Amino acid sequence: MRSEHSTQKMDDRPARILLKRAEIQERIRSLGEQITLEMQGLTPCIMPILDGGMIFTSDLIRQISLPITLLPIKASSYGQERVSSGRLELPLGVSPLARDQDVLLVDDILDTGLTLTTLYSSLLAAGARSVRTCVLLRKQHAVHLHADYIGFDIPNEFVVGYGLDHAGHHRNLPDIRCLETRKNPKSLNQSS
Ligand code: 5GP
Ligand code: MG
């Protein structure tokens, strides 16, 4: 039986491709090269911000030619909505294993900056030696916000795919798409 909630989901088809999988992979290759050069001599502790940063991180680390360690962190500020709640939840806290590490925080998207700003200070407070930040996407209204590595600057639209979700859906789409609410949505196959 389909609930009202899941019927609503069917009307939110992410029809318009913003970034194709090939351009994403090409950009990740050059980000990996840049990180390899700039973190030479270090053993970066790569910290994917779960859940959204998971897919980007798994491709990025294979483009970094340095010894690395992996220390995921769980954070969320969006819940089921398309706008930030303004409150960052860290259900598992910050790992004590971050102490004395050269951390590279990796997230899918920079929007209000709440996630990176909060984690940056929490990691330094937890004894990290250094903290760098890397995001695949930065929204236009966040261009004044700093991250050490940025994949793409994008318009102020709600995007899904390549790890980014809407209420838990669409993370497995290989391209990044804009989420649009339509009366008669085209199917994903028609639009690609
Ligand atoms: P910030 O803390 O910078 O406001 O937002 C970062 C987090 O908000 C990201 O990790 C991501 O989970 C979520 N977010 C922000 N904008 C979008 C968007 O356009 N699409 C999706 N799916 N998530 C977003
Ligand atoms: Mg996130």
Image (cartoon, helix red, strand yellow):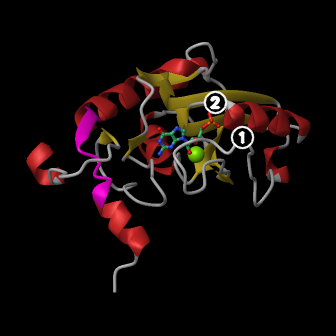
Does the rendering let one see residue 44? no
Residue placed most toward the observer, 45 or 77: 77
14, above or below 22, in the image: below
Looking at the image, which residue is at 55% across and 15% down? 143
Quarter holding ligand 1: top right
Distance from Cα at disc 2 to Cα at disc 1: 8 Å
In the picture, measured across the screen, residue 19 lies left or right of residue 99, that is left
Does the rendering let one see residue 126? yes
Region in magenta: 11-19
Looking at the image, which residue is at 36% across and 26% down? 27
Examine the image and state in which quarter residue 5 appears: bottom left
Reading the image, the residue beneath label 1 is 86
Looking at the image, which residue is at 35% across and 56% down? 172
103, above or below 150, in the image: below
Is residue 15 one of those drawn in magenta? yes
Examine the image and state in which quarter residue 31 appears: top left
Reading the image, the residue beneath label 2 is 112
Residue placed most toward the observer, 44 or 56: 56
Q: Within 8 Å: ligand 1 and the Cβ of disc 2?
A: yes
Residue at the farthest front position: 183
Rendered-image quadrant of the C terminus: top left
42, above or below 55, in the image: above
Examine the image and state in which quarter residue 30 appears: top left
Find out whether the residues at labels 2 and 1 contact each other: C-beta distance under 8 Å.
yes
Where residue 125 sits: x, y (%)? 90, 37
Rendered-image quadrant of the N terminus: bottom left
What amino acid is labelled 2 in the image?
Thr
In the picture, measured across the screen, residue 156 lies left or right of residue 1, that is right
Crowding at label 2, few (<14), some or many (≥20) Cα neighbours within 10 Å? some
